[in-house]
Amino acid sequence: MMNRKLQQLALSLTLIFLTGCTLVETDPPPDQMIPKENKTFSISELRPADDFYGYQNAKELLQMELPETDNSNGTLDIIQKTVDDQIEALILEIANSSHTENVIPGSNEQLIHDLYWLAFNSHSGKHDTSIQDTNFLDSVISEIQAADSMNALFSIWERLCTEYDNKTAVFSYIMPNLENTEEYIIYINTFGGLSLQELLENAFSAAGDRNTMRDLLYAAGMDYDTAKDHATAIEYMLLDIAAGTDFDALEQAESSLHTRFHGYTKQELEQQLHILTYEQLLHLCGLQEYPAERLYFSDPAQFFLIDSLLDESHLQIWKDYTICTLLKDWELVLPPEYGQKNNFDGMTDQDYAIQAVNTLLENQIGEVYTARYFTEQKRQDVTKICQDIIDMYEILIQKADWLTSKGKTALIRKLRRMQLFIGADTPHEIDPADAALIGNSMLETFLHMKKFHFQADIEKIGTPVRVNGFEAMPPQIVNACYVSENNCFNITAAIMNAPLYDETADPAVNLGGIGAIIGHEISHAFDNSGMEYDETGCYHPGWMPEADVQAFQEIMKRTVDYYDKFKVLNTYHVNGQKTLGENLADISGLQCVLSIAGTPDAQKKVFESYANVWEELTLDSYAREQIYEDVHSPAMIRVNAVVSCFDEFYAIYDVQEGDGMYVSPEDRVRRW
């Protein structure tokens, strides 16, 4: 077998030079599909007119390392690694501070310091609470195993939910009402974090899931063979539920968030419930004090199928499933007696402590990180870029010949009402009572945190919606997003790092980096999903004139057809419909920043910077998975398919008919 470095080299050559980089109608000859070991490659042979992604990124990709544990590595991953290293240094700095006597109770520093050393000493065994933690877990599991009826188990589910925010088969969360975004709704979901479709379609996933549950039940005290049999029974039930779920309909509904929010009144629910009562459902979700006129469901058919299985004949299966979800959820803080398969046992004491702080104090870490690394200059610069992009979008909308005057007015009204959340929120007000969140053991602390966050979420019910785009993602995550129901845009502090944003860089370089990302996210307000929401964030398909809706349908069809023709690994076609929203955003974002750049010299820098954003080394197996699962097109196509749509690219790089990057003018897709 080739060593890892040679594998990376072959992978780079395969992905960059020989696959999916151009619009291909036929497969190449077999002898061109796999690079031969004796074939030499010269980067100087690459031409932007044939493969702009490869031309711009080849040198860096050939030098890039792909960690053994990762499927891919690229620009965004490298920035995130830098941020993670900075956060680790901050945690250690706070943990090792000699000025703890001056730390304010409830402050970020106090919580981080105390949790770090609790985790460090617990993992090392210096602070041993395993007996009390084991006794507590034993009592919880014994109570579950002793439940002699489904009603008894329902009572346990209620307590696990309200006390520990533990999610079993049915749970809730609180979110704005899509039809009236000034109020919150209670949203009922099922099987959080578990992909039933993956279990149904992939035998390896189903077997792996069964084995995980077997090990958890074994850790909980069952003998190995019994644990295996009980885990198999759980898996069969999950597969039965998966078989009764219409995943095709759910996938089609992805184009509209609204189709995943089905509202039922109490009377309507009671007419279809098999086992549960309306009151029991509220109790299971910790909502007994918050009766609502209407409950909302992501997949009512699946929910009612689960309800039909909540009978006495499935009691043992549901008890076993409850134990598995509890131990999996509490994995970070399990005592040794429950840790036979604990993924944290192999960590050093320091790494475990850092992991614990990052997991349990995410918001506090975000505030500490931004206080150190997010400057007011960054906020002002990126805010200016956002404002320039919004101004340019207004110009592009005004010039769009496919829009009616009423349609232009509606889009611009939504654009101007969009709220921008740049970098990070203002620090929260310190509450000395928060110091008590750090308990005597890691398990106790974990449960304090779970209850704290559950109560904070549930207390939103009955209050006016407070739009805060910073809640969409923590500031230490390298990302940005648009939130349809709030008509707001969030870009994190962590993503504002070189090479995406550099205070010393040419403005055009920043436009191609952070600017294209901002333009991408803002344009989601006008993609195939965003166009269903009006300027207030309410689901309102009729907010746009019908003529404009029809014209946009034609743009979407052309975009789907355009991307359907692209391949990766010379075999796997991009799914133009699945990736439609992201493709529209890519094209729109680049069109906007190119328009701002203005001159050919500046636009050339935009193209180059944009290509660098999506520089990524990817295993071929992961590239195949992306095609089937990811709503984004693969990195190469996010570059080559997009830049090929712009006349400016052809002029700057002298792209001619017959070149690999050439797309006929009538096939080039433009958003505006």
Image (spheres, rainbow, N blue to C red):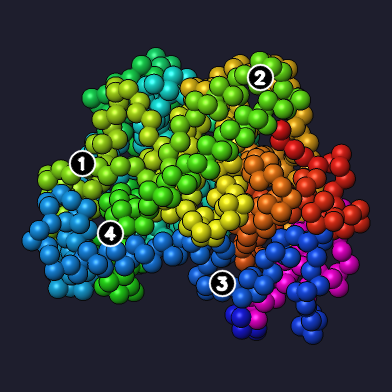
Query: Badge 1 is on which residue?
Result: 429
Give the distance between the C-alpha atoms of the residues marked 1 and 2, in whole angstroms: 43 Å
Could you tell me how far apart the alpha carbons at marks 2 and 3 are, in whole angstroms? 47 Å
Residue 18 figure quarter: bottom right
Mark 1 or mark 4, earlier in chain: 4
- Reading the image, the residue beneath label 2 is 407
| Nearest to viewer (mark 4 / mark 2) | 2
Q: Are marks 4 and 2 in contact (CB under 8 Å)?
A: no
Disc 1, disc 3: CB below 8 Å? no
The residue that mark 4 highlights is 357
Q: Nearer the viewer, mark 1 or mark 4?
A: 1
Judged by depth in the image, the label closer to the viewer, 1 or 3, is 1
Task: Kindly tell me whether residue 514 is visible in this rendering.
Answer: yes
Image quarter hosting the C terminus = top right
In the depicted structure, whether residue 299 falls above or below residue 357? above
> As drawn, is 340 to the left or to the right of 568?
left
Residue pointed to by mark 3: 66
The residue stretch that appears in magenta: 6-35
